[in-house]
Amino acid sequence: MNNAAIGIFDSGVGGLTVAKAVRAELPDESIIYFGDSIHLPYGNKSPSAILQYSFANMRFLCSLGVKIVIVACNTSTAVALTKLQAASSVPVIGVINPGAQAAVTATKNGKIGIVGTSRTVLSRAYTKSIQTICRGSNFNEKKIVVYEKACPLFVPIVEENFKNKKIIEQIVYEYMRELASKTDTIVLGCTHYPLIRPVISRVFPRIRLIDSARSTASAAASFLRQNNLTKKKDGNTKLHIYTNDINEVFKKISHRLFPRKKILFKEP
Amino acid sequence: MNNAAIGIFDSGVGGLTVAKAVRAELPDESIIYFGDSIHLPYGNKSPSAILQYSFANMRFLCSLGVKIVIVACNTSTAVALTKLQAASSVPVIGVINPGAQAAVTATKNGKIGIVGTSRTVLSRAYTKSIQTICRGSNFNEKKIVVYEKACPLFVPIVEENFKNKKIIEQIVYEYMRELASKTDTIVLGCTHYPLIRPVISRVFPRIRLIDSARSTASAAASFLRQNNLTKKKDGNTKLHIYTNDINEVFKKISHRLFPRKKILFKEP
């Protein structure tokens, strides 16, 4: 039993989809979220910049006494997770492995697609994660092929809340038609993407969509339960949302996911 | 006569369209460009963050001895120009006033449209600038109405070099049709936008498009000539491109505008 909060960080507001999934999965846990908005988006930054920001984010959460850190940013997980885990005194869970695991479990034809930011796709982190999983005993028999595709317009579509659904459908089709023709399972490998999941489902109804936010929340829940780190049910459950830049996009998406929740400012 | 370089800064690589226009207008001048890529985009940051970055950018250029600073970022000009001018020991030119001036000169029906990032549009800086110009003697007679529209997908379309021209045309139409139905002149109020100018012209052939990069280059040229600050024609002309994060997008667009030009790294 451990009553400390679960720490979650992202490059901005997108990781709140993970916080939302954690809240649904573990309603009695306290959550401290930090969005590094002044450096958003990580997707077009260099690896060394991403490393530096990720460490600063983790240090901030640890300074508030969290019991576990969830890296709710695919780009950050792809670039920095191993180094964060090596340096941290608390467990660190990334957002890639749980999604990869869920995809391997879900696929019937052994062909998995990944959509994400340019940086996540360039890192090929999902492909590597799936290959590692397949080398493990449970999936030894499966021969899995992975296709990755960067979709740089998805994040601004979500952040703007772009209204013309017909155009969004065309953009979704343009980016994903090749993946969808080859695979039966596609991982939404960016925390913003669950917010356009309904459109993606409509365009490709045949495809199994893996929401990495939900997969990560499940993985965190399993980890806490297995290690006896869950919080006492005492009705005293906090959700603190911090960011270093309270801008319009952050406010809009935060209120969409957690209405009435105050956003706390952290000095950059 | 002053042989020092012209300093130009932007929140990233987009302002290189201004550097390109300055080079075309003043081929004998040296240019030092700085792109604050680690904080890109400014469009969704808070005013206080934008102020802080703008001052740091100006200090960097001044430390290299430039004779004038061009703020090649609409967001930064909208939020920080007056304060930068008050604090600087060299002249500072923003990117809004020249575009506004060119639009007032170009319009026949007195209706001007502005497209830009959310932050630029929220600031209403173009509207204010046009109102100030109209209050001046030359345009006293003209009654000008200004309509502004944020187009958040344009920057990522340019940065990605999105290939499906049909979809870009639809996005352009979606954002701009209302402006185009009311106005005869539209200002491309973001330095990225000149790179999709051909598509915009195709969708709205009737509209006069004002390229704020070119207008700013002309304004800088006039200022230097009027104040006897131009450089001696000595064949010794430099163009130095600095950024604090050499990422793929920066490289791609820099090479599109200035092929073979080495990008210099500035410690963040």
Image: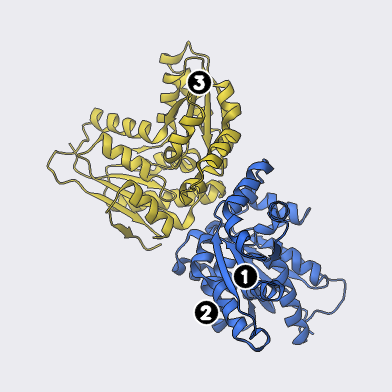
Chain colours: A yellow, B blue
Q: Which residue is mark 2?
A: B83
Residue appearing at x 59%, y 67% in the figure: B74
Question: Three-letter amino acid code at disc 3?
Answer: Asp
Question: Three-letter amino acid code at disc 1?
Answer: Lys
Element type at marker 3? loop
Distance of label 1 from label 3 (alpha carbons):
52 Å
Distance of label 2 from label 1 (alpha carbons):
30 Å
Mark 2–mark 1 CB contact (< 8 Å): no
In the rendering, which numbered label is found on residue B111? 1
The quarter in which the C terminus of chain B is drawn is bottom right
Q: Chain of mark 1?
A: B
Up/down of A267 relative to A121, above or below: below
| Residue B122 left/right relative to B233 | left
| Residue A133 left/right relative to B249 | left
Distance of label 3 from label 2 (alpha carbons):
56 Å
Residue appearing at x 47%, y 30% in the figure: A202
Q: Are marks 2 and 1 on the same chain?
A: yes
